[in-house]
Image: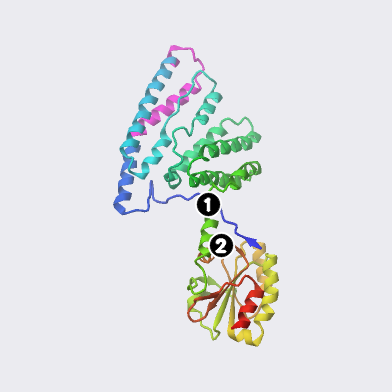
Amino acid sequence: MKHIRLCYFIILLAFQPWQCLAQKDSINLENKAFESFSSDILTEKEYLMMLEQFLMYYDDTTSAFYIQGVEEYHTRRGKFNELVRVRRKQDKNLSISSIYAFHYVPEIPWSRSPQQMIKNIIRHYFDSIDFTDLNIAKSVHSIEWMNHYVNLHMQLAKSHAQTDSLATAAAVHAIESAKNGDPVIYGWMVDYFYNGFESNNLPAGMKALTPYLADPRCLTSKRMEIERRLQGTETLKPGIKAPDFTLQMSDGKVFTFYDYQTTASEILLLFWSADCAHCLEEVEKLYPFSQQPAVKDKMDIIAISLDETDTEIIQWQQKITKLKNWKHLRAPEGINSKIANDYFILATPVMILVDASTHQIIALPEGFSELQRISLQQ
């Protein structure tokens, strides 16, 4: 059986700097508020960052100049955080206000070493964040904010080998901070690190995510997609019109389901994969059955491959040469394709028997034996 293998991704809203699914006026209001907020904090934030870098690496921490710099930093940090707090309150009815909290500046113990100060920033990085706020997962600024958090950990690395353990530590701390918030934000945080670990091939990091991925409360993008498809399978039932689709056939021609003309009264949609052992077992039984004159006149087979990799595609191309008289299509994005999404496919093989003239679903046989029984009853 070939199971769902969804790509992990962070859902980012494309409208810059902010997009919400609302009326145009509402979007404009959000963007104007963000532009105003950015303008208000820009100069002060830049000054704070420069002062922070200066103080963190200044060598004479006992000098009057350094002490004056620390006092200046504390004063400006307090005023800056108060400005953020006021703007959050002022724009509290706008979704964009959720990301204002990303700009809070934590207190830094200047008497410690640079590494200790970075560790302190990390320790308090999420102090001002409300992890029950779903808007956190909707802004590109959330990713920038998380990237900065991970980069703080990388500043602590003394060797390349340390980066793996520091990245894993960053993930655990961040996820534990978000864990008791909304399950969607909890899942979003896990998605962020899964995506990073997968892209950078960090098995230790992936292993650290295992308990979170197994947690039913952790609504990662994959878990939510599986749940959505499971719920969708309840709506895809006999009497419902099967969704239309357009795919390329094995001979390069374009095939559109609703435009397909046939003298057969039924169409069997077979979702399968050439590298799926169970699929091949079903195909071995289905093909000779479909070639029987009585069945061949009554039923057309449209076999939709969900093969994705080069190896799988070669296997599929070789296999279909032995499955003549079937219509062979392939969904390039496999289990993540639009057709797999529209038909709520979680694993292969899947059979859907459809009325050829109305495109209404007749039955969803769970295998060849049930299909054969249904066919004999008609």
- Of badges 1 and 2, the one in the foreground is 1
The amino acid on which the numbered mark 1 sits, given as a three-letter code, is: Ser
| Label 1: which secondary element | helix
Picture disc at residue 333:
2
At 49% from the left edge and 23% from the top edge, which residue is drawn? Answer: 56
Image spot of residue 292 (x, y percent): 66, 85
At 31% from the left edge and 49% from the top edge, which residue is drawn? Answer: 28
Which residue is the extreme one toward the left? Answer: 25
Quarter holding the N terminus is bottom right
Q: CA distance from mark 1 to mark 2?
A: 17 Å
The amino acid on which the numbered mark 2 sits, given as a three-letter code, is: Glu
First in sequence: mark 1 vs mark 2: 1
Rendered position, 40 above or below 323? above
Image spot of residue 3 (x, y percent): 62, 60
Q: How many marks?
A: 2
Asked whether 63 falls inside the magenta stretch, the response is yes
Q: Which residue is mark 1?
A: 221
Q: Quadrant of residue 166?
A: top right
Asked whether 168 falls inside the magenta stretch, the response is no
At 46% from the left edge and 46% from the top edge, which residue is drawn? Answer: 137
Position of 203 compared to 27: left or right? right
Picture disc at residue 16:
none
User: Which stretch is magenta?
Assistant: 40-66
Q: Quadrant of residue 81?
A: top left
Are the residues at dot 1 and dot 2 in contact (C-beta closer than 8 Å)? no
Foreground residue among 107 and 59:
107
Foreground residue among 182 and 47:
182
Position of 288 compared to 361: left or right? right
Quarter holding the C terminus is bottom right
Inspect this view and state whether residue 316 appears: yes
Rendered position, 142 above or below 375? above
Rendered position, 95 above or below 23? above
